[in-house]
């Protein structure tokens, strides 16, 4: 039997988000209902609410979540009722051209639940990133559930479901940071600071945090940065070169995603160095640069999709590193809030006052 729960929805780009009653259907084949324990307030949810990703309102917001499997549909054998899971938005299909080549991290046909969640009047909801977890419960595909250690704090490990994985993976998976490398990270919000934490674990010796906000640079230092650059006070490229004996960093991660920050990343890397773009640009942004500069500097220019992760491989590993005290994920949780405080949390996010607000249910 379907059930009604409280959830946060966005009805239009010019309206605040609302707490509403929605309908969760019983899970069909391959589907799972998850009781949400915690969900991070990610910038992607704000972008959905403002119509910046698609115009398929109304949206069921929230995607960076952890919870417990409440019920499963026919054919589900990867999780069982009672399992503690972190939700992911890369449930690989195994059959697309990327998967068949063994590049599952690039899967082009990831799974979502087939059934729709709705408002009580039957209006279909579009779940953010196929999840929709600012809700007491949500319906997802079984492949979107990654089992992790149930002793972990849900409000902490929920962040692995998006921002932490995106940043950590940008450095470790996409950027392939290794021992002795120098790394610069431009933009020290949740994703950028996760890249810093990842670079530290990978053995980078110089980790340079770049931001315009002194508070974020302080957070970056706590998470592993060895040097900081306030971009509002100094030339970023020159400062990175100065720290790296005039050469530039081996890997530069752009966690902002703007033309000007990408240019900084490009010119702040060493010859044959790597640039990783993990910040998400908007559709109207364009980049104009001399083509000769691309040729003459060599190296690699990469985009990082979800940190090029494989959830079944990476999520449990990150949880274990957290439990061992080697990955201080608790530092990313700036505040714990109720489900009725999401609109307020968006305002706090716009001001840059938090790494993450986390909804606890």
Image (spheres, rainbow, N blue to C red):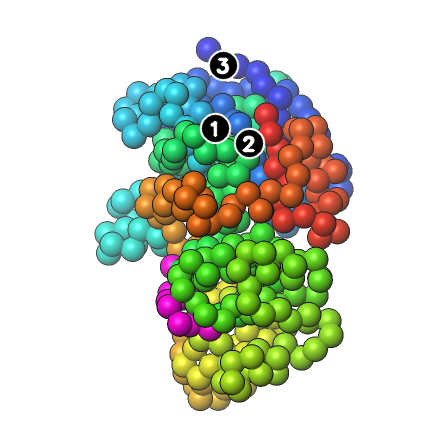
Q: Does label 3 or label 1 sit earlier along the sequence?
A: 3
Q: Nearer the viewer, mark 3 or mark 1?
A: 1
Question: Can residue 9 be seen?
Answer: no
Q: Is 88 part of what is drawn in magenta?
A: no
Name the residue nearer the viewer: 140 or 78.
Answer: 78
Q: Secondary structure at mark 1?
A: strand
Residue 202 placed where, x, y %? Answer: 40, 61
**Tag on residue 67?**
1
Left or right, 316 with reference to 54: left
Range covered by the magenta-colored residues: 173-182
Q: Is 177 part of what is drawn in magenta?
A: yes
Residue marked by disc 3: 2
Dominant secondary-structure state across the stretch colored magenta: loop
Q: Residues within 10 Å of mark 3 (few under 14, many from 20)?
A: few
Q: Quadrant of the C terminus?
A: top right
Q: Nearer the viewer, mark 3 or mark 2?
A: 2
Q: Say above or below: 240 vs 169.
A: below
Q: Residue at x 38, y 51 (%)?
A: 309
**Tag on residue 38?**
2
């Amino acid at each position: 039997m379907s059930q009604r729960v409280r959830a946060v929805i966005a009805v239009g780009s010019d309206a605040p988000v609302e707490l509403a009653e929605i309908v969760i259907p019983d899970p069909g084949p391959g589907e799972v209902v998850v009781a949400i324990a915690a969900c991070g307030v990610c910038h992607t949810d704000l972008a959905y609410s403002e119509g910046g990703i698609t115009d398929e309102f109304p949206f069921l917001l929230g995607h960076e979540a952890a919870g417990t499997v409440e019920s499963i549909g026919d054919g589900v054998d990867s999780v069982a009722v009672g399992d503690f899971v972190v939700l992911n938005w890369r449930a690989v299909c195994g059959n697309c051209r990327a998967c068949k080549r063994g590049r599952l991290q690039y899967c082009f046909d990831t799974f979502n639940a087939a059934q729709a969640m709705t408002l009580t009047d039957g209006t279909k909801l579009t779940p953010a990133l196929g999840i929709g977890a600012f809700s007491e419960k949500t319906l997802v595909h079984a492949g979107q559930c990654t089992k992790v250690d149930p002793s972990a704090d849900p409000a902490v490990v929920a962040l692995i479901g998006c921002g932490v994985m995106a940043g950590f993976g940008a450095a470790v998976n996409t950027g392939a940071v290794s021992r002795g490398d120098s790394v610069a990270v431009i933009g020290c919000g949740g994703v950028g600071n996760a890249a810093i934490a990842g670079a530290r674990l990978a053995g980078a010796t110089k980790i340079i945090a770049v931001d315009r906000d002194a508070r974020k640079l302080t957070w970056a230092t706590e998470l592993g940065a060895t040097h900081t650059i306030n971009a509002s006070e100094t030339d970023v490229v020159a400062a990175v070169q100065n720290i790296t004996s005039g050469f530039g960093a081996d890997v530069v991660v752009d966690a902002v995603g703007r033309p000007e920050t990408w240019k900084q990343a490009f010119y702040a890397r060493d010859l044959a160095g790597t640039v990783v773009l993990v910040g998400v640009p908007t559709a109207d942004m364009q980049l104009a640069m001399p083509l000769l500069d691309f040729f003459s500097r060599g190296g690699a220019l990469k985009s990082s999709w979800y940190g090029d992760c494989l959830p079944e491989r990476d999520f449990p590993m990150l949880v274990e590193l957290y439990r061992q005290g080697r990955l201080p994920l608790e530092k990313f949780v700036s505040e714990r809030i109720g489900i009725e405080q999401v609109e307020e949390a968006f305002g706090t996010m716009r001001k840059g006052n938090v790494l993450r607000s986390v909804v606890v249910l």
